Amino acid sequence: MFQLGKTIVSEDLLEKDFVCNLTACKGACCVDGDAGAPLSLEETQILESIYPKIKPFLRKQGIAAIEAQGTWVKGTDGELETPLIDNKDCAYVIFDGKTALCGIEQAHNQGIIDWKKPVSCHLYPIRVKDFTEFAAVNYDKWDICDPACSLGQELEVPVYKFVKEALVRRFGEDWYAELEKVAADLKK
């Protein structure tokens, strides 16, 4: 672990390799697990405002879940998160064949909205936990992502490089530039 500004960062971001391999995992991170995607308060407001624009991209089961539960929910731990369909799939998940994709991201890709998706999804496999004085930035190792770890090793892409856009989105360009300096120093 090392400190970078007001963050405590796991060295796993620099030492582990990762490149999403949707052909192998089929987007399992969006349909497996026991909770929805973590959301910030600001993101709950964004979801409320963009829902009418993304609704046409969603499955009928997702629409039903959102209209019954809301565009976001409080999880069992009291944290804000995306609603689930029958305690399984994220309500915003759509499918391309057997591969889970994000309906929000599809609307973004088609230029309907300018918000890509929740930052927690964009950052994955990194998880950020905010505390009063700092944020903990950790690599979340999950067995369903083993193919992504293998592909990352094959292509020699560390986690922090794979999620660069999301890290910049969450922490800014300057923070990411400092992270790159730390990574370069560790290679020496």
Image: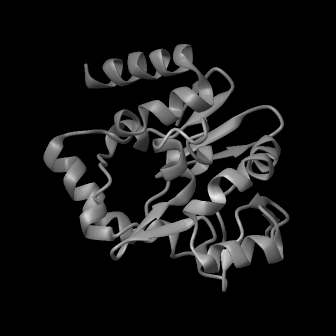
Taking the image as shown, residue 107 lies to the left or right of residue 73, namely: left
Instruction: Tell me which corner region of the image, top left, top right, bottom left or bottom right, holds residue 3.
Output: top right
Determine which quarter of the picture holds residue 160. Answer: top left
Residue placed at 58% from the left, 47% from the top? 117
Could you tell me residue 139's position as x and y percent? Answer: 48, 49
Question: Residue shown at 70%/63% (left/top)?
Answer: 82
Give the residue displayed 61% in from the left and 32% down from the top. 170
Question: Residue 13 at x, y = what percent?
Answer: 42, 40
Looking at this rendering, what residue extends furthest in the bottom direction?
86
Q: Quadrant of residue 43?
A: top right
- Residue 24, placed above or below residue 1: below
**Residue 92 as seen in the image, left or right of residue 97:** right
Q: Is residue 33 left or right of residue 78?
A: left
> Is residue 31 depicted above or below 112 in this figure?
below
Residue 5's place in the image compared with 123, above or below, is above
> Would residue 57 be visible to someone looking at this image?
yes
What is the tally of numbered marks visible in this picture? 0
Where residue 24 sits: x, y (%)?
Answer: 25, 68
Residue 7 image offset from top left, x and y in percent: 64, 30
Q: Quadrant of the C terminus?
A: top left
Query: Please, is residue 34 above or below residue 38 in the view?
Result: below
- Give me the residue at 33% from left, 74% from top: 97
Please indicate, yes or no, whether residue 126 appears anywhere in the rendered image: no
